[in-house]
Amino acid sequence: MTTPDLEPQPQPLPEDPALAAAVLEIESHVAQAGWDQPARLYALVDTAELVAQEPALAAAMSIDGPGDDGSFTPIEQDGLPPGQALEEALQTIAWPDSVSGCAAVIERLVLPPGADDELPDDPTAAELFAREHPDRQEVRMVAGVTRAGASYCALRLRAHDDEQSVVDGTELVPGLLELLHATLHDPHDSPHDSPEQGQA
C-alpha cells in the first residue's frame, strides 16, 4: 500500500461534503475504542433512503430523516475472516445497488521516507523490520468512497492521538481508495451481504 502523506497541509474543499462528514464520523467513533483494533468495513447508505425503506432500523439507530437529507449513514459490516487482510477481502466484495459508498478502517505501521529500500522481501521479515524500526509511526487510516467517484480520508497517528491532530483530505491513501472504488464498480460473482448488519 502506498505510504500516506502525514504532513498537515491546506486541503481543498471535499468533493462530497456528505462523504467527508461520514468518514470523520467513523474516525471519531473508532477512536473512542482506542488502538490495536482489527480492520473494519462500512457500507455508506443514503440516510433519507434508509429512513424511507427501513424505518425500524432507522429508529433503532436514532436517525430522524428529514434533517439528514444529503447525508450518509455508516453501517458496520461483519468482521473479516480470521487471518485475511483487508486488502485481500476487498478484492472479493461487490456491494448491492442500495449502497451508495463504502469506507474502511485499518491500522498500519508507517516508516520514514527511504526506509522502504531497506525492507526485506520476505513478508514476515518485513513486518518484523517495520515493528522494530526506531522511527516507525502507528497510524489509523479511514478511507471512504462513493459510487459517484468521490473519495475522502482521515488519518490519526498514535503518537498524536487527539482530534486536533487528525489529518484529512481527498487522496491521502490512494492504494486503499482504489480498492474501495473497485468494490462499487467491478463485477463480481456474488454481492456482499445486505448492509443492514450493524451500525457505526
Image (cartoon, rainbow, N blue to C red):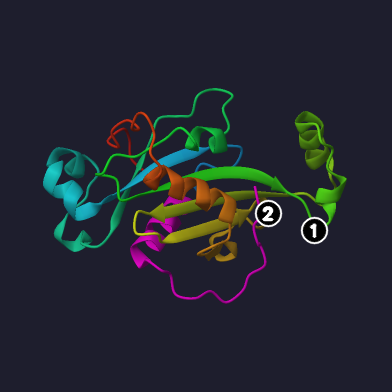
Q: Position of residue 185 (x, y in %)?
A: 38, 47
Q: Is residue 102 left or right of residue 143?
A: left
Q: Earlier in the sequence, mark 1 or mark 2?
A: 2
- What's the amino acid at mark 2? Thr
Task: Check if residue 171 falls in the magenta segment.
Answer: no
Residue at image x 59%, y 24%?
Answer: 83
Q: Is residue 144 visible in this depiction of the protein?
A: yes
Please name the residue that numbered disc 1 is placed on. 113
* Label 1, label 2: how far apart the Cα atoms are: 9 Å
Q: Position of residue 77 (x, y in %)?
A: 38, 35
Residue at image x 16%, y 55%?
Answer: 65
- What's the amino acid at mark 1? Pro
Please name the residue that numbered disc 2 is placed on. 3
Which part of the image, by quadrant, shows the C terminus? top left
Instruction: Verify CB contact (< 8 Å) between mark 1 and mark 2.
Output: yes
What element does badge 1 sit on? Answer: loop
**With respect to residue 137, does 193 lie above or below?**
above
From which residue to which does the magenta span run?
Answer: 1-29
**With respect to residue 141, does 194 lie above or below?**
above
Report the label total: 2
Mark 1 crowd level (few <14, some 14–19, many ≥20, 10 Å Cα): few
